[in-house]
C-alpha cells in the first residue's frame, strides 16, 4: 500500500529496504518508551526505510528512528539551547537539519499529527494531520 502510494505521488527513483521485523518495530517502544503510529507501522511492515536515488533517507529506518531520537533527547549540550524533544517522535528530516515527527500525547501515545522541528529557532510547527 505505502510503496504504491509513494510511486503514485512521484516518478522519482526511490529504493526500499526489506520490511522491518516485529522485534525491530518493538525496539522503538522498548528504547524510547513511546508507541508508534499505526500508519508508520504499516509502512515499516512494507519497508524499513525509503531512500532517494542518492541513498538519502526520505523515511528513516527503525534503527535510525531509535538512534536519532535517543540522541536528541539525551545530548547534554542541547538541553541548554532547545526545548525538550520527548514530546516528538522523529522519523524523517529535510536534509538541512530540520526534522519531522509525530506529536506524542500523554507521554507515550503518538497522535497522527506531523510536526517539523526547525533547528535554527527551535520552533515546532504543525505541518500535516497525518
Image (cartoon, rainbow, N blue to C red):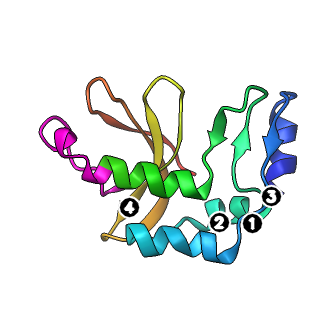
**Residue shown at 29% from the left, 33% from the top:** 123
94 relative to 51 in the view: left or right: left
Q: Locate residue 87, reporting x and y percent.
A: 32, 57
Name the N-terminal-most of marks 1 and 4: 1
**Label 4 to label 3: alpha-carbon separation:** 27 Å
Name the N-terminal-most of marks 2 and 4: 2
Q: Which mark is residue 18?
A: 3
Are discs 2 and 3 less than 8 Å apart at CB? no
**Label 1 to label 4: alpha-carbon separation:** 21 Å
Badge 2 element: helix
Q: Locate residue 30, reporting x and y percent.
A: 44, 75
Are discs 2 and 4 less than 8 Å apart at CB? no
Q: Which residue is mark 4?
A: 104
Given residues 96 and 117, the one toward you in this image is: 96
**Residue shown at 81% from the left, 40% from the top:** 15
| Vertical comparison of 56 with 76: above or below | above
Question: Magenta part of the protein: which range?
Answer: 73-88
Are discs 3 and 1 less than 8 Å apart at CB? no
Badge 4 element: strand
**Residue shown at 51% from the left, 53% from the top:** 65
Q: In which quadrant of the rendered view does residue 70 lie?
A: bottom left
Given residues 96 and 24, the one toward you in this image is: 24
Nearer the observer: mark 3 or 1; the answer is: 3
Q: Which mark is residue 103?
A: none
Q: Which residue is mark 1?
A: 45
**Label 1 to label 2: alpha-carbon separation:** 6 Å
Are discs 1 and 2 less than 8 Å apart at CB? yes
123 relative to 82 in the view: left or right: right
Are discs 4 and 3 less than 8 Å apart at CB? no
Q: Which residue is mark 2?
A: 41
* Quadrant the N terminus occupies: bottom right
Q: Locate residue 39, reporting x and y percent.
A: 65, 62
Amino acid at each position: 500500500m505505502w510503496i504504491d502510494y509513494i510511486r503514485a505521488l512521484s516518478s522519482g527513483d526511490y529504493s526500499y529496504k526489506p520490511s522491518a521485523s516485529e522485534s525491530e518495530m518493538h525496539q522503538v517502544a522498548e528504547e524510547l518508551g513511546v508507541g508508534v503510529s499505526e500508519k508508520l507501522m504499516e509502512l515499516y511492515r512494507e519497508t524499513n526505510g525509503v531512500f532517494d536515488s542518492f541513498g538519502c533517507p526520505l523515511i528513516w529506518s527503525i534503527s535510525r528512528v531509535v538512534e536519532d531520537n535517543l540522541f536528541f533527547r539525551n545530548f547534554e549540550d542541547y538541553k541548554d539551547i532547545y526545548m525538550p524533544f520527548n514530546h516528538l517522535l522523529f522519523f524523517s528530516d529535510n536534509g538541512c537539519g530540520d526534522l519531522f515527527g509525530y506529536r506524542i500525547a500523554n507521554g507515550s501515545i503518538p497522535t497522527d499529527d506531523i510536526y517539523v522541528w526547525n533547528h535554527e529557532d527551535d520552533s515546532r510547527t504543525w505541518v500535516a494531520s497525518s
